[in-house]
Amino acid sequence: MQALIFDCDGVLADTERDGHRVAFNKAFTAKGLDLEWSVERYGELLKTAGGKERMRRHFDETGWPGPEAGRDTFIKDLHKLKTDLFMELIESGRLPLRSGVARVIDEAIAAGLKLAVCSTSSERAVQAAVNIMLGPERAAYLPIFAGDMVPAKKPDPAIYKLARDQLGLDPDRCVVIEDSNNGLRAAIGAGMHCIVTISSYTGGEDFTGAELVVPELGDGDAIAIRLADCQAVCAS
């Protein structure tokens, strides 16, 4: 095994329902839009990777609030505001790490493995999440590869191929921790092994092709995945 790579949302923390969704709704209110994404609606929109892409899909399906000529600027400005609001939530400390994440990262650092975070979210949001939730010492070992760095988002494998190329990785010696079908397909598409930790929105998804599927990485008496399990995946 050469590298351990993490998705961010749903893997490092269960941020989708209580983080991104809340921030989107606050942004809609701030912009005077009569719109609120319910837990169920956001779960449906999550099938589309990327926040700007989700908003485009929603307005394509329900109607746009402004003229067609200004849509790109409208989406860009709304997403920037949403990111500001999401970062406020992260910085508040109200979104904790998922069980086992810090433990496995510390094991990988101690073993001298390369690490990375590959996410469809913006670089700004992902870097804030890593810095705040994992702390600066761990963040120093975790280069960020974000959705705004590649032309296509998950399930396209572009984000994992970018990490492969920039870190000089052999994909068959890499293990990815993902929580969604889109993420799993992206990791497999890049030739990497993938372990799935199910999050609040992904329990009913198809994880065919995953090396292992667990509720969480786990801590204490509930450890489900150790670094040795990841290493065994590469050795098989």
Image: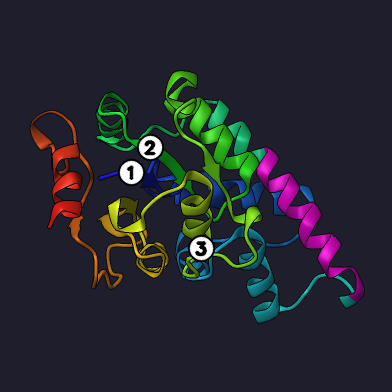
Mark 2 residue crowding within 10 angstroms, few (<14) / some (14–19) / many (20+): some
Name the element at disc 3.
Answer: helix
The alpha-carbon separation of the residues under discs 3 and 2 comes to: 33 Å
Residue positioned 20% across, 53% down in the render: 234
Query: Which residue is at 40% across, 70% downward?
Result: 189
Magenta highlight range: 69-84
Q: Which residue is mark 2?
A: 114
Q: Closer to the N terminus: mark 2 or mark 1?
A: 1
Q: Nearer the viewer, residue 13 or 17?
A: 13
Query: For the view shown, which residue lies furthest in the left direction?
Result: 221
Check if mark 2's residue and mark 1's residue have beta carbons within 8 Å: yes
The correct choice, above or below, for 210 with respect to 221 in the image is below
Q: Earlier in the sequence, mark 3 or mark 2?
A: 3
Q: Please state which of the two labelled residues, at mark 2 or mark 1, is closer to the viewer.
A: 2
Name the residue beneath numbered marker 1: 4
Q: Position of residue 170 (x, y in %)?
A: 36, 53
Of the 4 image quadrants, the one containing the C terminus is bottom left
Q: Nearer the viewer, residue 187 or 67?
A: 187
Mark 3 surroundings: few (<14), some (14-19) or many (≥20) residues within 10 A: some
Q: Which mark is residue 217?
A: none
Mark 3 or 1, nearer chain start = 1
Residue 42's disc number: 3
